[in-house]
Amino acid sequence: MRIEEMFKTGKPVLSFEIFPPKRNRELEEIDDTLKVLCELEPDFISVTFGAGGSGISSRTVELAKKIRRDYHVEPLVHLTCLNYTKQEICEILNELEAAGLENILALRGDRNPDVEPKQDFQYASDLVKFIREYGGFHISGACYPEGHTEAKNRIQDIRNLKHKVDEGVTHLVSQLFFDNEFFYGFQEKARIAGIDVPIEAGIMPVINKAQIERMVSLCGASLPAKFQRIMSKYENRKEALFDAGMAYAVSQIVELLANDVDGIHIFTMNNPKVAKRICTEIRNLI
Ligand code: FAD
C-alpha cells in the first residue's frame, strides 16, 4: 500500500523507524525487535539508509524486503543521494521495483567531510525529481520543525521544502523535537506556504542522556529546560530515566494527537521496549 493512502482513513498514522544491523551481524538478529514492533500494528516501518561513501547500503533493501515478506507490514525505504551517482540510484530503484517495494523516503544525506559528494544530486529535491521521472513510487521527504542546520533561515528552508514537495513528495516526516510548539509553528508556516501534504511528527523517546546530547548536537534540535531537568535528575538511574523518558514522549504524543496531528513517527532506536511502552500508553487514542 502506498503511504499517502494511509492518511486518507481519517485516523492518525502510526509508524516506527529502525536501522539495519551492522554489516558484520546477521540480519536475523533484528527479528526479536521486529516481532514486537509488528505486533503493535504500525501502519508502516521505515528503514534508515547509510549516507554513503563506502558502497551502497543494500542492507536497507534486504531489511525492507524482510519486513514485507515475514511480517506483512509496509516498509518505507530511506534513500540518500549526495554520495551516489544517478546510475547507482537507478540500480537501487530497479531492485526496489523488482521487490514490489513502492515507498521511498527521499533524502539528501548528511555531508561527510571525508567524502567528496558525487555531484549528480545536490539536494533531496533532485532525488525526488529523479524518482518521479523513473515512475511507480510513492515519495516521502524529511522536514525540520526547528529548521535544517544548514538553512540560511527558516523562510528559505520552507521555500526549499515547498520546492521539494512540488517535485513529487506526498508525505513528510519531521526531525525529532522536544517542544511541540516548534512543530505547531512549523506546520502553520508550511500550510501558509501551500505545503498541503500530511506531516508526521517525529518523536524520539529518550533513554540515554549522552546519546540524546550527541544526537541533538548533530541535528540542531533544542532541549527545553524542563526536559534537561528531567535528564539531569535521572541520568544515573537507568530505570528511572527510562520511565521519565517514556512519560515525556507520551505527553508530547498525547498533546499532538489532541491537536489533530496527521501521524506519529517513533524513532525506536531498535528498542522494542520503547515502542511497546508508548503504544500501550496511547492505545486508546489512535
Ligand atoms: P534537503 O531537503 O536537500 O535539505 C538540505 C538543506 O538544503 C536544507 O538546509 C535545505 O533548506 C537546503 N536546500 C534544499 N533545496 C535547496 C535549494 N534548491 N537551494 C538551496 N538550498 C536548498 N540521513 C541518512 O543518512 N540516512 C537516513 O536514513 C536518514 N533518515 C532521516 C529520516 C528523517 C525523518 C530525517 C528528518 C532525517 C533523516 N536523515 C537521514 C538525515 C538527513 O539526511 C539530513 O538531515 C540531511 O542533512 C538533509 O537531508 P534532506 O533530505 O532533508 O535534504
Image: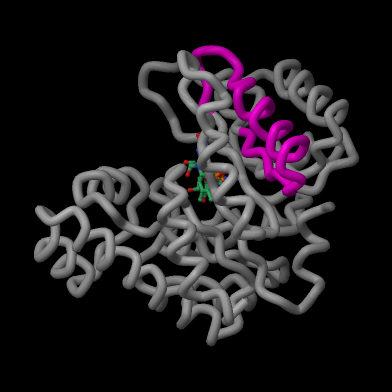
Q: Which residues are magenta?
A: 50-79
Residue 81 lies, with reference to residue 243, above or below; the image says: above
The x and y percentages for residue 90 are: 78, 22
Q: Quadrant of the C terminus?
A: bottom right
- Residue for point 75% across, 68% down: 7
The x and y percentages for residue 174 are: 53, 59
All told, the count of numbered labels is 0
Query: Is residue 126 in view from this perspective?
Result: no
Q: Nearer the viewer, residue 173 or 280?
A: 280
Quadrant of res 113: top left
The x and y percentages for residue 52 are: 53, 22
Q: In the rendered view, does 251 fall on the left or right side of 202? A: left
Q: Is residue 215 magenta?
A: no
Residue 41 lies, with reference to residue 105, above or below; the image says: below
- Residue for point 45% across, 66% down: 278
Query: Is residue 108 in view from this perspective?
Result: yes
Residue 86 lies, with reference to residue 167, above or below; the image says: above
- Residue for point 31% across, 57% down: 206
Q: Nearer the viewer, residue 278 or 83?
A: 278
Residue 148 lies, with reference to residue 279, above or below; the image says: above
- Residue for point 37% across, 59% down: 205
The x and y percentages for residue 85 are: 67, 18
Q: In the rendered view, does 285 fall on the left or right side of 276? A: right
Looking at the picture, the colour scheme in use is one colour
Residue at the limit of the structure toward the bottom, as seen here: 258
Q: Nearer the viewer, residue 284 or 196?
A: 284
Quadrant of res 121: top right
